[in-house]
Amino acid sequence: MLPRIVSGLVALLLVGAMATGCSGQPAPEPSTPSAPTFASDEEAFAAAEETYRAYVDALNAVDLSDPATFEPVFAWLTGDASADARQQLSEMHANGWQVEGTTAIVLAEGRPPGSAFATALNVCEDVSDVDVVDATGTSVVSGDRPDVQPVLVGFELSVTSPTGLLMSSIEGRQGPPLCEQ
């Protein structure tokens, strides 16, 4: 009886091997996902705004005493923007600082073609509710900081981002559109 069971198992394994393609041919290479493309500038700008808003939400959720809360911020960044954020948040954590309040996006509009980035946003962010305090509770924010900050945000295409974009630069900007104080 045992030889019959073994024979049956061997036959089943052989049929299974043939059915799964064990034919000596190499398995096909898995395809590498390609970078996302957008059908229009409007679609790209919508993805950029969605990316930036997700980043600001993650930034507003940061607890400087808990570096694990930094990871959602880093997930939206690449290149210099990522390196800068990692350094800044690590330094703030090491200094024992705390963030109070939240940043609000007042304006986010697509930057006209011809900028240094494939997709870029002009942003006005309201930081009037945000304070950063040291371990003694003393603010470390400059007293002359404007309540609304004009920012230029550059993006790169990404296969790892749910929006198809990651932020590659975040820098102050001048010129239109103006951010009302």
Image: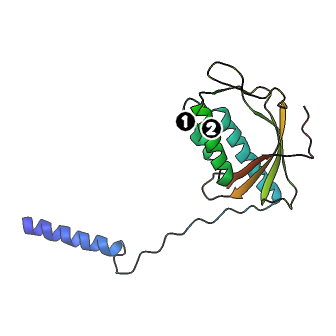
Residue 38 in view of the camera: yes
Q: Nearer the viewer, residue 48 or 86?
A: 86
Badge 2 element? helix
Residue 1 in view of the camera: no
The quarter holding residue 96 reads top right
Label 1 with label 2: CB-CB less than 8 Å: yes
Mark 2, Cα crowd under 10 Å, few <14 / some 14-19 / many 20+, is some
Q: Residue furthest left?
A: 1
Q: Nearer the viewer, mark 1 or mark 2?
A: 2
Q: Is 46 placed above or below 181 here?
A: below
**The C terminus appears in which quarter of the rendering?**
top right
Badge 1 element? helix
Gap in angstroms between the C-alphas marked 1 and 2 = 8 Å
Q: Is 94 placed above or below 30 here?
A: above
Which amino acid does the dot numbered 1 rest on? Pro
The quarter holding residue 91 reads top right
What residue is shown at x 73% (from left), y 45% (from top)? 52
Q: Which residue is mark 1?
A: 67
Q: Position of residue 61 (x, y in %)?
A: 63, 32
- Numbered mark located on residue 123 in the image: none
Q: Position of residue 105 (x, y in %)?
A: 79, 37
